[in-house]
Each structure stands twice: as C-alpha cells, then as structure tokens.
C-alpha cells in the first residue's frame, strides 16, 4: 500500500494517554452524565484515569439505558449509581446520604446540568415566561448551590466543586437567549461560594468550555453556526472536546491546583479573547 492509499489513522484518545495517579484515593461525585458525548463524562473519565473513585447519577429510567454502560466503564459501585432529577424533592439529598454511607467523605463534586423550556430558550429574553425563567434558574443554577451545601460537610479535608458555564454569560450570543442571564447567575454564585468555602479548603471552579455538540447544546437554535464561527475565530482554530475539558478539570481537582479558586476557567482554544 502506498502512502496516498493509507487511510487516516484514528485520533488517539488523549485521556488514554494520561500517566498520572494524582487523584488516587479521591472520591468524586459527577452530576450530569447523559451519554458518552456529555462534558461530564469527559470529566469523569479523566478523573477516573487519574485514580479517582467515581459516583454518578442518571435522571430517569430512560436515561439509565444510556448511562449504565458508562457507569460500568467508570467502575461505579451499584450503590453509587443513583437516580437524580433535581426537580424531584429529596432525590439530590438521597444521593448525598448514599455518599455519606458508602464513602463518609467527598473530595470532588461536579455539576453539569442545565435546562430551559424550549419555548423560552428559543424566544427573546424579554418574552421569557416567569415559569420558564424560574425553572431554568432552579435546574441550571440553584441546584449547584444545593449541591455545594450538601457537599460542604463531606469535604472534611477540603475539596473542589465544579460547574459548567459558557461565554454567553458575559457577552450576547445570538440564540443563547435566556440561558445567558441564567449562566451569569451561575458564574456569580460560584464566585461567592468560592469566597465562602475557601477557608475550609474547598475550591470552586466555574468551567467555561467553548461550543461542544452535546445533548443540552442541541436545544440551542442554530448551534452548528455558532460552532463554525468559534472554530474559525479561536486562536487555535479548533473547538475543544469533552476530553479537553475533562483533562483540564481533572488537573484543577488535583493538589497541584490547590491555590486556584474562583476564576472562570476558559477551555476554548482562546475563543473568549476574540469572540
């Protein structure tokens, strides 16, 4: 076979190239894995590769069929693979009760969920319904505050809290609509949590990836156009992947990053400096 006839080799998985045990013995809870394209899954894989033990949730029986194989791949104990819809009273609390029984402590908690009703997400902010706005705030922002509240007593030796935001919290992005102010609230909440929990050694990181084609992002109008513009304008001329976000997030969870907290961490090939 000549060189020109060879097929392009598959790209190497950067997480599989990791040779680090920096998170060995750490206990990590991941909220928001919907499928194998989820940012949360990239983070969980990277943390697991670095030695962390993983607990995770699924939203309902329908999503369980997508996430059970992922839980198996992450070696999640059955007692720590639990249902959690943050809109159902008591489910998030039940997860933390299980974490307390099984582990008795927690080192890492990652929040990667967001939602707004379709009619509100696709409409102008000025036309957003009260019910839609409150729902988006509850699921996308307040649930992170609840998670931090529940994680605090388990982070006896300090820890790291993560949530996923987007540059649309800081600048107007066409079609991002109501998620802009919702993510702005999430970012600001993370900064206040960082200030409040810092004395206990608990770091808080709002992570801002560039556009990634996830299940949640598919609900945003003309998202493919946003991705194309981002790839063309970013200094690295490329979009980030869930693996990129996962590896950077896992690093921030290690003790190497113990003096970093409260900053929005952009993982976007530099898009935020020109976008």
Image (cartoon, rainbow, N blue to C red):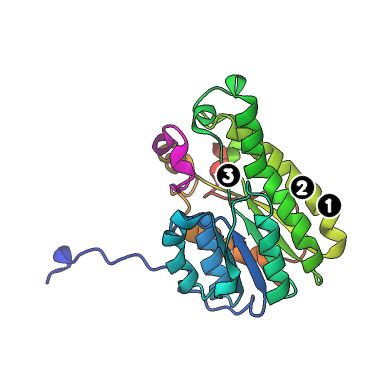
Q: Quadrant of residue 140?
A: top right
Q: Is residue 263 visible?
A: no
Span highlighted in magenta in the image: 212-226
At 66% from the left and 80% from the top, the residue drawn is 25
- Answer yes or no: do the residues labelled 1 and 2 have beta carbons within 8 Å? yes
Q: Position of residue 199 (x, y in %)?
A: 88, 61
Looking at the rendering, in which quadrant would you find the C terminus? top right
Of the image marks 3 and 1, the number of the one nearer the N terminus: 3
Q: Which mark is residue 114?
A: 3
| Residue for badge 1 | 195
| Residue for badge 2 | 191
Of the image marks 2 and 3, the number of the one nearer the N terminus: 3
At 48% from the left and 61% from the top, the residue drawn is 243
At 67% from the left and 75% from the top, the residue drawn is 26
SS type, badge 1: helix
Q: Quadrant of residue 32?
A: bottom right
Q: In the displayed structure, would residue 117 be above or below residue 248?
A: above
């Amino acid at each position: 076979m000549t060189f020109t006839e060879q097929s392009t080799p598959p790209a190497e998985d950067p997480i599989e190239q990791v040779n680090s045990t920096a998170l060995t013995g750490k206990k990590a809870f991941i909220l928001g894995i919907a499928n194998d394209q989820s940012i949360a899954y990239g983070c969980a894989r990277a943390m697991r590769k670095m030695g962390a033990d993983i607990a995770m949730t699924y939203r309902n029986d329908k999503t369980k069929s997508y996430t059970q194989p992922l839980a198996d791949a992450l070696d999640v104990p059955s007692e720590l693979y639990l249902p959690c819809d943050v809109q159902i009273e008591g489910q998030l609390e039940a997860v933390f009760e299980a974490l307390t029984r099984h582990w008795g402590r927690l080192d890492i908690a990652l929040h990667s969920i967001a939602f707004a009703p379709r009619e509100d997400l696709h409409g102008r902010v000025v036309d957003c319904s009260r019910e839609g706005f409150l729902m988006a705030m509850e699921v996308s922002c307040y649930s992170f505050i609840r998670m931090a509240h529940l994680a605090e007593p388990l982070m006896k030796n300090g820890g790291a809290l993560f949530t996923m935001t987007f540059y649309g919290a800081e600048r107007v992005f066409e079609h991002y609509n109501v998620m802009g102010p919702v993510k702005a609230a999430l970012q600001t909440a993370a900064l206040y949590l960082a200030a409040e929990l810092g004395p206990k050694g608990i770091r808080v990181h709002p992570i801002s990836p560039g556009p990634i084609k996830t299940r949640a992002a598919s609900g945003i109008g003309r998202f493919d156009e946003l991705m194309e513009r981002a790839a063309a304008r970013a200094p690295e001329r490329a979009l980030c992947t869930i693996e990129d976000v996962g590896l950077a997030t896992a690093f921030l969870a290690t003790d190497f990053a113990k003096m970093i907290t409260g900053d929005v961490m952009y993982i976007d090939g530099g898009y935020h400096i020109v976008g």
